[in-house]
Image (spheres, grey):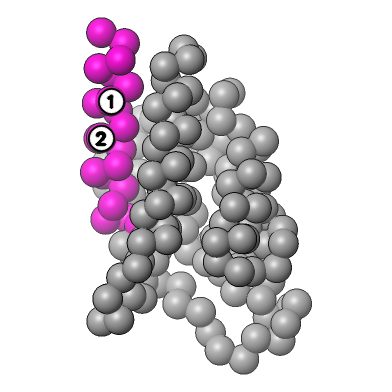
C-alpha cells in the first residue's frame, strides 16, 4: 500500500469521526449511522494488512472520548469488529453488494449489542440503547462510502 493510499485512508477515518459527531435533528437522531464503524470496515476490507487490530486502540479511544463512555468500551468492540472483518474479508471480496450489506448489518448489530451488554454489566443501565436504527442506516450508507473510497483509491493509482 502506498503512502498516498494510507493518507486517503486516514482522511476517510477523520471524516468518519467528523460525521459521527455531526448533530442530527431530533426527529431522525436515532437513525445516525455508525460512520466510524463503516469507515473502519472499509479500510480493513481494502487493506487488511495495513489497517489491522492496531486501529482498534486509537479509533476506540477517540470514540470513547467522543461518546463519553467508559474508557475501553469502544476499543473492545472495535477490536472484535476488526478481527471479524479480517477473518471474513476474503469471503466478502466475492460477495455482491447486497451480501456485503448483509455482512455490514450483522457486524453493526453485533457492535451495538456488545455496547449494550457492556453498559448493562458495568453500569446496570436501565434503558435499552437503539440497536436497529444505527445499524440499518449504516447498511444504507455502505454502498456510497464503498464506491467513493474505491473511486478515490483507483484515481490515485492511475
Viewer-nearest residue: 48 or 12 = 12
Q: Position of residue 104 (x, y in %)?
A: 41, 51
Seen in the image, is 12 located left or right of residue 150? Answer: right
Q: Is residue 25 visible?
A: yes
Residue beneath the point at 56% across and 89% down: 127
The stretch drawn in magenta includes residue 153: yes
For label 2, the crowd category at 10 Å Cα-Cα, with few meaning under 14, some 14 to 19 and many 20 or more, is few
Residue assigned mark 1: 152
Q: CA distance from mark 1 to mark 2?
A: 6 Å
Q: In x, y percent, where is residue 126?
A: 62, 91
Q: How many marks?
A: 2
Tag shown at residue 148: 2
**Is disc 1 surrounded by few (<14), some (14 to 19) or many (20+) residues within 10 Å?**
some
Left or right: 29 as drawn, with respect to 130? left
Tell me, yes or no, whether the two marked residues, 1 and 2, touch with CB atoms within 8 Å. Answer: yes
* Residue 32 percent across, percent down from the top left: 35, 66
Q: Would you identify the image quadrant in which residue 4 lies? A: top left
| 97 w.r.t. 110: above or below | above
Q: Residue at x 36, y 54 (%)?
A: 19
Q: Which residues are magenta?
A: 138-158
Q: Magenta segment, principal secondary structure? A: helix
- Reply above or below: 157 against 97: above
> Looking at the picture, does residue 128 appear above or below residue 144?
below
Q: Give the residue at x 74% y 78%.
A: 121
Residue lying at the far right of the rendered structure: 122
SS category of the residue bearing label 1:
helix
Q: Quadrant of the C terminus?
A: top left
Q: In the structure shown, which secondary structural element does the residue marked by tag 2 occupy?
A: helix
Residue 149 colored in magenta in the image: yes
Farthest residue, direction bottom: 126
Amino acid at each position: 500500500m502506498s503512502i498516498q493510499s494510507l493518507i486517503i485512508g486516514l482522511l476517510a477515518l477523520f471524516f468518519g469521526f467528523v460525521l459521527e459527531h455531526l448533530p442530527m435533528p431530533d426527529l431522525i437522531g436515532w437513525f445516525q449511522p455508525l460512520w466510524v464503524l463503516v469507515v473502519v470496515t472499509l479500510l480493513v476490507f481494502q487493506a487488511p494488512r495495513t489497517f489491522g487490530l492496531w486501529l482498534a486502540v486509537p479509533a476506540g479511544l477517540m470514540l470513547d472520548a467522543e461518546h463519553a463512555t467508559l474508557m475501553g468500551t469502544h476499543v473492545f468492540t472495535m477490536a472484535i469488529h476488526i478481527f471479524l472483518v479480517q477473518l471474513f474479508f476474503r469471503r466478502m471480496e466475492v460477495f455482491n453488494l447486497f451480501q456485503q450489506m448483509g455482512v455490514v448489518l450483522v457486524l453493526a448489530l453485533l457492535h451495538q449489542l456488545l455496547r449494550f451488554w457492556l453498559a448493562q454489566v458495568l453500569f446496570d443501565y436501565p434503558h435499552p440503547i437503539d440497536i436497529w436504527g444505527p445499524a440499518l442506516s449504516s447498511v444504507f450508507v455502505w454502498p456510497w462510502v464503498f464506491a467513493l473510497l474505491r473511486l478515490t483509491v483507483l484515481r490515485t493509482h492511475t
